[in-house]
Image (spheres, rainbow, N blue to C red):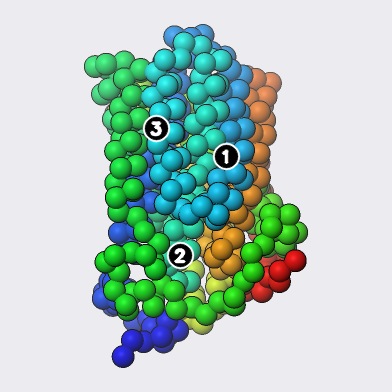
Amino acid sequence: MIQTNSSRLAQAAGASVGDKVRGALAIGKTRWGMLALVFFATTLNYIDRAALGVMQPILAKEMSWTAMDYANINFWFQVGYAIGFVLQGRLIDKVGVKRVFFCAVLLWSLATGAHGLATSAVGFMVCRFILGMTEAANYPACVKTTRLWFPAGERAVATGIFNAGTNVGAMITPVLLPLILTVWGWQAAFLAISFLGLTWAVLWARNYYDPENHPSVNKAELEYVTGEPEPNQAAVPFHRILRMRGTWAFAVAYFLTAPVFWFYLYWLPPFLNQQYHLGINVTQMGIPLIIIYLSADFGSVGGGILSSWLIGRGVSPVKARMTSMLMFALCIVAVVFAAGTANLWVAVLAISLAIAAHQAWTANIWSMVMDYTPKHMMSTVFGFGGMCAAIGGMFMTQIVGYILTATNNNYTVLFMIIPGMYFIALAWLYFMAPRKVPVVQEG
């Protein structure tokens, strides 16, 4: 007889980690294949983004960019990202994750290749705008896939795994790019990344299906991923979704905290280069970045394990997420030590702890919004929150550019601001986040 989802989770509460993994795989492995697809998509997504940060010193020298030029290039990426998030989130709910995500990756890969034709800061602004608009589909699609394929007890772990692709992409980039730059130049680097994206799009089109339509999912796994009872929900227009408390709970908290990772992505290479006089090669720049982003991977997956463990002990999903997020916010305070130290490895340690805690926080805030949002509006709610986060990123790039210009490239103020954003966001979530999936009436 097939066990119910709740009985499996109750059994899992008393099991060892190894038993839990074996039990999860025994139910079926198809959902982990779907998770692998979105993990690799996220990896490629961040290779595209991290490439600009790693190549910034070369491109700045060749095209005479100022700090404000670089800030503006990233600003226009965020403009496109904000627009793309809300549009593609809504499209995914209406048209389906498979078709929308395929088209988005196809277009963002072409936009990446177009960077190799740019000859000025303005050209890069245009390319980054298009890239941002199309890359915005990644997270609504990944979250929708996780919401469809994983029950609450596995959701944060699954989210942490696919989001670990951000750090894998950020680690791979400083290792591979110097080799390509040395042999073929920066234009070839963008073309190579474009080819990887086109290859992934073909794999997605051939292999992804929603649970009810997948040709190889077994009955036990299908019941496991769809077995949590959820009230029948009416179709809801966009303006009503904007009036829901849960939409704004997520949107404001994500607006405050998501730009921090973009700060790390865009400004860590310039910070390390300026503060510690590192060159653009695997030994000098690559190793510190690899350590930082490897730490972020551990934080991403480990953060999901913590809240899943709490759920297994009977804590409600939303409460488990917020308890975990408080712990991670406390760890992020370590980043204040990064700017003031003359020792490279002290800075790397402080940033590593903070970015690991950030990724753990992210795994839980994404899982939380899945916990209280109906399936049929998941991408819309996440897309709106992502748009707000991208707007926050637009402000962040301008604030960073202004502060660095006004302080002669002093990062201390920036590292001091970061921890407070998480505590403000957590207080907002505590008062605003629903504790369960609401029943949404038509009209």
Identify whether 33 is placed above or below 21: above
Q: Residue 29: horizontal and vertical position, in percent?
A: 28, 67
Q: Which of the 4 image quarters holds residue 236?
A: bottom right
Left or right: residue 294 versus residue 63 is: left
Which residue is at the front of the view, 308 or 382?
A: 382
- Mark before the other along the chain sequence, 1 or 2: 1
Residues at marks 1 and 2, CA–CA distance in whole angstroms: 22 Å
Left or right: residue 99 versus residue 244 is: left
Q: Mark 2 points at which residue?
A: 148
Residue at x-position 67% and y-position 24%: 402
Q: In which quarter of the image is the C terminus?
A: bottom right
- Mark before the other along the chain sequence, 3 or 1: 1
Q: Quadrant of the N terminus?
A: bottom left
Residue at x-position 34% and y-position 52%: 37
Q: Name the residue under label 1.
A: 84
Report helix, strand or loop for mark 2: helix
Whether pointer 3 and pointer 1 mark residues with C-beta atoms closer than 8 Å, the reply is no
Whether pointer 3 and pointer 2 mark residues with C-beta atoms closer than 8 Å, the reply is no
Residue at x-position 39% and y-position 18%: 116
Report helix, strand or loop for mark 1: helix
Q: Residue 50 carries which label?
A: none
- Mark before the other along the chain sequence, 3 or 2: 3
